[in-house]
Image: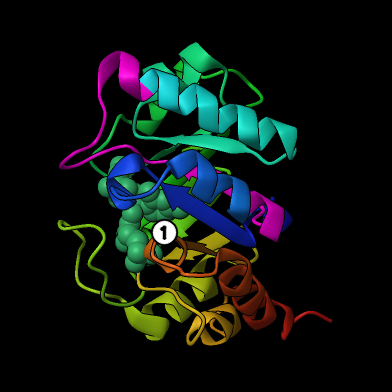
Amino acid sequence: MKEELELYFIMGSQNCPDKDPEDILEHALKAGITMFQFREKGERARVGEAKRQLAERLQARCRAHRIPFIVNDDVDLAIAIGADGVHVGQTDEAMQVVKERCPEHFIIGVSAQNAEEAKKAIRDGAHYIGVGPIAATRTKIDAKFPIGLTGLREIRKQVGDFPIVAIGGINQKNAEAVRQAGADGISFISVLTKAVNIRQAVDELKMGMEKMHR
Ligand SMILES: Cc1ncc(COP(=O)(O)OP(=O)(O)O)c(N)n1
Ligand SMILES: Cc1ncsc1CCOP(=O)(O)O
Ligand SMILES: [Mg+2]
């Protein structure tokens, strides 16, 4: 699980209104992302059949590169298209229901902003926790106040070696510090959806993550 979390890209069409999301994902996959989350939500997001069709197109790209395809929030969609997993937050579908409904092999990710939420998610059967927001972000309008590296370190201290991916305001400048503060992986949206050169951006993020490797 930890290796898959290393470079976890998240995107929906609302994150790249002037570009083709399939094109962005293909570049990101070729550059070496290790997991992908389809997060189609908010203003200008696709709904219904258009959302499902986009999900299936992006899923096919991930399959071709053997990269896990995770669906954000929408458990029905994840099950319907045979995704590799779902990611749910504190106010999304309850973990007990998610566990009951999803196939055994599903990867289940849960968001946590503090150690209590993190420990509960682990007790409830999460496979990884998405910890953040680490820094300020403009991508999620209802994002909570950033917990910083201090918040991340505290959660790491309390969850032992449980898989953690950090999220929120992560970029080439802070990736290494985030890794050093205890994240097994980083997740990011705008650093790729707004990148002029996706390969270069992924390479730089990867460098930040690899500095800690033994
Ligand atoms: C890897 C990862 N971590 C956290 C989140 C945030 O989930 P949530 O708090 O439910 O907010 P939304 O993304 O649903 O707006 C995430 N999506 N992925
Ligand atoms: C989905 C989500 N959850 C917490 S912050 C965030 C947005 C991350 O986007 P960015 O990488 O552009 O800051
Ligand atoms: Mg959610």
Residue visible at 60% across and 55% down in the picture:
28
Residue at 38% of width from left, 65% of height from top? 194
Q: Is residue 37 above or below residue 159?
A: above
Amino acid type at mark 1: Thr
Q: Is residue 169 left or right of residue 159?
A: left
Q: Choose between 214 and 69: the one closer to the eye.
A: 69
In the picture, the quarter occupied by the C terminus is bottom right
* Number of marks in picture: 1
For the magenta stretch, what is the residue range? 29-51
* Left or right relative to 127: residue 32: right
Question: Which residue is rendered at x = 35% and y = 27% of the image?
Answer: 74
Residue position for label 1: 193
Q: Secondary structure at mark 1?
A: helix
Q: Position of residue 134 (x, y in %)?
A: 36, 74
Q: Give the left or right position of residue 130, taking residue 146 as reference.
A: right
Q: Is residue 33 magenta?
A: yes
